[in-house]
Image (cartoon, coloured by chain):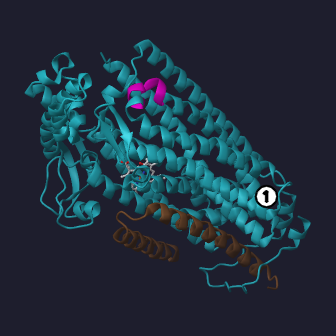
Amino acid sequence: MKTIGYFLLFFVLAMIVIFLVIVMGEAAPWYFAWIIGTGLLILTSAAAGFLFDTQEEKSKGTPQ
Amino acid sequence: MINDTVVELSRWQFAATALYHFLFVPLTLGLTVFLAALETVYVVTGKPIYKEMTQFWAKLLLINFALGVATGLTMEFEFGTNWSFYSGFVGDIFGAPLAVEGLMAFFMESTMIGLMIFGWDRLSRGQHLIVTYLVALGSNLSALWILVANGFMQDPQGAVFNPVTMRMELESFTALIFSHDAQAKFVHTSIAGYVTAAIFVAGVSAFYLLRKRHMELAKRSFRMATIFGVLSTIGVITLGDALGFVGAHAQPAKIAAMEAMWKTEEAPAPFNLMAWPNQEKQENSWAIQIPYLLTPLLTHTMDTKIPGIAEIEASNALRIKSGIQAVEALKILSSNPSDAAAMAQFKAHEQDLGYGFLVKRYAPEQDVSKATDADIALAAKDTIPDVFAIYWTFRIMVGFAFLMLAFFIFGVIYSLRNDVENHPLFLRFSLWLIPVPFLACEMGWLTAELGRQPWTVYNLLPTWMSASSHSVSYMVFSLIGFVSLYSIFIIIEMYLMVRAIKQGPDDHHAVQKQDKNTSSGGSVLGGNYAPVHAKTLVNEQSKEV
Ligand code: HEM
């Protein structure tokens, strides 16, 4: 149940983000958006990796 | 005299080679960017597991890249061999981006990939990271140029037809590159590649998690891929909307076909969630509609009129009549370029020139001045593409987008809780999902290219005029040759990929050591997670590197 709750929450959030971007950028400078967006995507995915390691360290009780 | 069978076969050949080629491209576009993220973590944390992950996924990228280049090479030449009239007509505009694409792919991208694969022991960490970023940039930039070229075919910007040279000439390179269609198309396609890579990495990681092999690599890859994927899917949907918005202005017939909209309806028009289009009767046999939705979805307003197919066909018949005037003037100009009256007539009807070419196909002796109303009606009918195919290929692409979004959201939730390995059904589903983004990409191309018919260059050059004058037997022979060769390439790719995946990462002793110590891990969503201080964690193993 909790998983479904989180799913719905994240799905609604995703739809709100999509809606906002659509409303804000009809014929936007997409090349520019791509460069910035790809950079942020790389950093966010990298952050997901850091977070994983942090969780692992924490669960093993490694001092931080 | 142009042979319709040769034109059809040329279309089949291009479609087949392009669709095969695009089975390789999106993974390269996305995996290179994903590698940049992986290596960033390696360089920042110094943990060898991330180096191993980067090398493993780079090995799969290399297999895919090699076959992608092999299938792409032939396509560059196909424009000249099978579409020679097209190449002559728009070569000034099309040639430049195509050449830059070739240079980018074969020099920047290939060189950087070589450095990335073989440079681990020769470059410092920082230098290698820069190379990996350049691989990501290079692969996407080479796609940019071919998409700029395709953007020109969809919405020709930055060029004019010269009635003296009888060819299109480049007027503004900036307008060509920065056209709205090219911009949205490039970003949509590039991000579609990111989504493809994310599903691929998540699926292969799920395979390892199911088999309980290479767990450290698989869990980390799965985590990063799902975050990468959820953001990319949001991006691809957003840019899909932008493409539809651009198309609504530039290609009304394609948009009407994508939405199976036969008649113009009062704004705000209803959205055909599901429909069964019947081209002959120009109606939907059945449809499930959501009232008021289409107008805001397509035009981002509530009151803009969206023309239906019947209206588009009727207005195109008028454009054909005007186009006939342009073609007739052109005939005079071809023998006497200084004829002022003919030039004035041409200028007055220039914007409909392509429509004049359309009716040539049906006019007696291909002389447009002899075209009857019946010929004009036939040519006007041709301006409506295959509604059934376009409606459904578009629907499948969009359906897959939401399926993948839902998958990634579940993936992120399970991964953040660090218990994805305890959901075997979900993991199995991840594996089954691997073909989905590839199919979505193929559907996207079918939508874009079928929707552009009957034009190779929208509103300017009809497909039937664009082909070379080969014999039917030559076309059949080369089509069979290409399909057989490319099928062999696909089999080789599958074989090499499956073998490399079964083999797993080359050096996993360090990982196995970690595997033994691994417990279930903390969970962000579960609440038993506390953020660390912002200092970099340097794993003891990093000192081994
Ligand atoms: C709600 C989701 C989506 C929408 C609204 C959408 C919209 C579109 C449109 C309108 C086109 C035609 C462009 C043209 O006429 O030139 C297109 C093409 C394409 N789409 Fe999508 N799309 C969506 C999702 C996806 C997904 C998930 C993928 C793949 C992972 C994808 C890959 C492609 C590709 C490869 C093309 C052909 C190249 C291009 O024209 O950009 N699309 N899409």
x 26%, y 62%: residue:
B299
Side of B76 relative to A53 (left or right)? left
The residue beneath circle 1 is B52
Q: Position of residue B421 (x, y in %)?
A: 66, 64
Side of B407 relative to B181 (left or right)? right
* Residue B272 at least partly seen: yes
Q: In the rendered image, which quarter is residue B284 located in?
A: top left
Q: Position of residue B274 (x, y in %)?
A: 27, 52
Which chain does the residue under circle 1 lie in?
Answer: B
Q: Foreground: B449 or B497?
A: B449
Check disc 1 and report its element: helix, strand or loop: helix
Magenta highlight: main SS: helix
**Chain A takes which shade in the image?**
brown
Q: Foreground: B85 or B347?
A: B347
Amino acid type at circle 1 is Glu
- Using the image, determine if residue B23 lies above or below residue B54: above
Q: Give the class, few, some or many, for how many residues have Cα within 10 Å of label 1's Cα (few <14, many ≥20).
A: many
Q: Position of residue B166 (x, y in %)?
A: 32, 30
Q: Report the residue that reaches farthest toward the right.
A: B544
For the residue with label 1, is its CB less than 8 Å from the closest atom of ligand 1? no
The quarter of the picture where the N terminus of chain B appears is: top left
User: Which chain is painted in cyan?
Assistant: B
Side of B517 relative to B320 (left or right)? right
Q: Is residue B132 magenta?
A: no
Side of B76 relative to B361 (left or right)? right
* Residue B203 at least partly seen: no
Count numbered badges in the picture: 1
- Using the image, determine if residue B367 lies above or below residue B179: above
Magenta-drawn segment: B79-87
Q: Foreground: A24 or B342?
A: B342
Q: In the rendered image, which quarter is residue B335 located in?
A: top left
